[in-house]
Image (cartoon, rainbow, N blue to C red):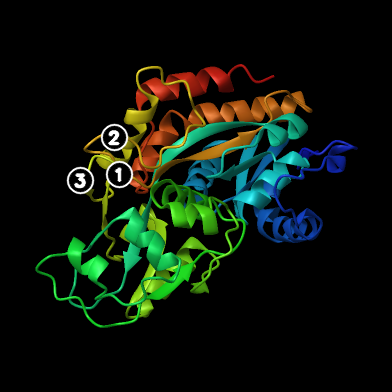
Amino acid sequence: MREVEVGGAGPGAASASITSRPRRTGNWFKVLSIILIGSLCPALFAAEQGVMLVGAGSSVPLPLYLKWADLYNQNNRTVQLQYVAMGTIEGIAQITHGTSDFGAGEVPLTVEERRLGNLTELPVVLIGIVPIFNLPGIPNLRLSGDVLAEVYLGHISHWNDPAIVKLNPGIALPSLPIRIIYRPAGKGSNYVFTEYLSKVNARFRDQVGKSASPKWPVGQPAERSSDMADKVKSTPGALGYVELQYADDNRITHASMLNAAGKFVKATAASITAACTAVEAPGWDKLSASLTNPPGADSYPISSFTWLYVRPSARDQRRTAALVGLLNWAFSDGQSIAIEEGYSDLPKPLVVKVLAKINAMR
């Protein structure tokens, strides 16, 4: 007889509540159930005497988790993995209420979320959020955080604004309206982007602030990272922000950013890793630190971890053992897969610290 477990909720799991972030968990519980029934059935029947691990959260690492699931599920008959992208904040809500086995996203947990959900975050890979643009005939562009903030506040509205021209000497910028595109509420890329802009522009910090659900004064939304990439690619004059992997996969140009050391830096695996090293070395023990606007001439300024949100103390020892096995694979073989998928792997000293936390789970 086959035994397959889906979800980790105990009888009282759904009673927890988080007041520090807006939640829409009731509706999403139904939505997640429908998604899982439809998408997980083939894997459910494939797993004999097994455990189905379900993750939910940000679309930023979605291609990575889908690839991990594909490879892990092919080689493991007793533990299967599925991941549903629904946004960072919903991902935190799902693991808090026991609907999923882990959450995923780019927003550090609050003290309240750690306490009420018995949660911790584990950095998985490094990401860079890049300003993507569509200016025909202009393959290279320089931007600063200060100028980018003024654009997203609506104070700079055309590509040939003097503030942008000053950063790009010798480039004939068109008198074209900037078509601003942003992510809707609950997205981890919003948090990373607004945290960075809040650090470098006081007016943005006062009027918008850092948030996964900012109240954007101008622009139009794009639901997922892939939607953002599609909208910018198809709209002349568009400006948006997306994870580097999506920009590269869609061959969308992205701007070089002025970093804290006064250097214009393009987002690459090396410049994103440099940002992490500048913050984490030599201790390599912060794990939930902000990587935006870091020191260092080589650091890309809109860098971040993408985290897994997990429950270190087991409600179900069997499910925890399955998760620990999956995560040990993810932080060994899985890191090389992350590189192949266009993400920046974690520096080795950081992986050692993360694995120690994983193997202390019980």
Identity, as a three-letter code, of the amino acid under mark 1: Tyr
What mark, if any, has residue 64 been given in the picture? Answer: none
The residue sitting at the left extreme is 170
Direction from residue 203 to residue 105 in the image, left or right: right
Q: Would you call the spot at circle 2 few (<14 residues within 10 Å), some (14-19), or many (20 or more)?
A: many
Q: Measuring from the top left, give residue 153's x and y in whole percent.
A: 45, 66
Say if mark 1 contacts mark 2, CB within 8 Å.
yes
Q: Is residue 68 visible?
A: yes
Tell me the distance, in whole angstroms, between the alpha carbons under discs 3 and 2: 13 Å
**Residue identified by numbered label 1:** 300
* Disc 3 element: loop
Closer-to-camera residue (273/354): 273
Q: Is residue 185 above or below residue 291?
A: below
**Residue identified by numbered label 2:** 274
Q: Measuring from the top left, give residue 333's x and y in whole percent.
A: 42, 32
Q: Residue at x 66, y 58 (%)?
A: 39
Q: Which quadrant does the C terminus fall into?
A: top right
* Disc 1 element: loop
* Disc 2 element: helix
Q: Measuring from the top left, give residue 191's x and y in whole percent.
A: 52, 50
Which of labels 3 and 2 is toward the front?
3
Say if mark 3 contacts mark 2, CB within 8 Å.
no
Identity, as a three-letter code, of the amino acid under mark 2: Ala
**Residue identified by numbered label 3:** 263
